[in-house]
Image (spheres, rainbow, N blue to C red):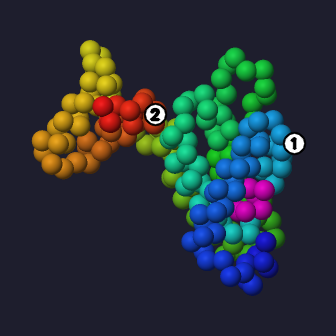
Amino acid sequence: MSQYLIFSDARWDDLCCNVPIAMHEMLKTWQYESHSPAETVQKLVNHIKYEVPAWAICVCAWCCGYIHELRMEQRAFLTSERSENTDRPSQPGLLQFLLSPINDRGMDPVFNDRCSMMVHVMQCMSANIDRKDDAPGSSLPVEINQTPSKVMQQLFNNCIKQKHFSTKILHKFKQLLILGGAEWFCSTIVK
């Protein structure tokens, strides 16, 4: 792969945008039971991690953002989550393939350092997918006697009155987005 990059006229920003798009297309074929077994996906991800570690970070960033747009039942091919009512065997998702350690036998120490940094960066990016970044004492986005729509309306009205967004309010909006999903969040904001 790297021998093609040397003579390529493609710009890095274009490549970093197009690699996640290609992975998305590959995931669609994997999701709909095509002839792409998990081993093929693992091999592709490993090849990306070995040849151009920056692309693996681009794919991970896209994957984390894309997961936030999906409902829980749609996340299966990106994470290893499986619902109990499926007969399909559980297999690792794209994030697990990206976060799996690289076999570094016989590799240059600089490559090993670069790959360990790459995996650490991707672990930090994907930590909030599992909600590991929430503080143990963090407040719930919705109180027991309120509906999420009512909380969203109150937050939005407070932002309009104050004419700014604080970090705390942005965090609450993020929690509501995760709680209700992208479709609910957008329709509630528009109302």
Q: Amino acid at mark 1?
A: His
Give the residue pinned by disc 2: 183
Name the front one of labels 1 and 2.
2
Q: Residue 29: x and y, percent?
A: 77, 43
For image coordinates 55% across by 45% down, the residue present is 66
With 133 as the anchor, is 137 left or right in this view? left
Q: For residue 112, which quarter of the picture? A: bottom right
Asked where in the image residue 83 lies, by quadrant, the reply is top right
Amino acid found under the numbered disc labelled 2? Glu
Indicate left or right for 21 with 135 as reference: right
Q: Main secondary structure of the magenta part?
A: helix
Q: Residues within 10 Å of mark 2 (few under 14, many from 20)?
A: few
> Going 30% across and 44% down the picture, which residue do you hit?
170
The relative height of residue 1 versus residue 63 in the rendered view (above or below) is: below
Residue position marked by numbered label 1 in the rendering: 35
User: Is 14 in front, or is 128?
Assistant: 14
The range drawn in magenta is 44-49
Q: Residue at x 37, y 40 (%)?
A: 174
The verdict on residue 37 being magenta is no
Nearer the observer, 121 or 181: 181
Q: Earlier in the sequence, mark 1 or mark 2?
A: 1
Residue 190 can be seen in this image: yes
Q: How many marks?
A: 2
User: Vertically, is 187 above or below 128?
Assistant: above
On whether residue 48 falls in the magenta region, the answer is yes
Disc 1/disc 2 C-alpha distance (Å)? 31 Å
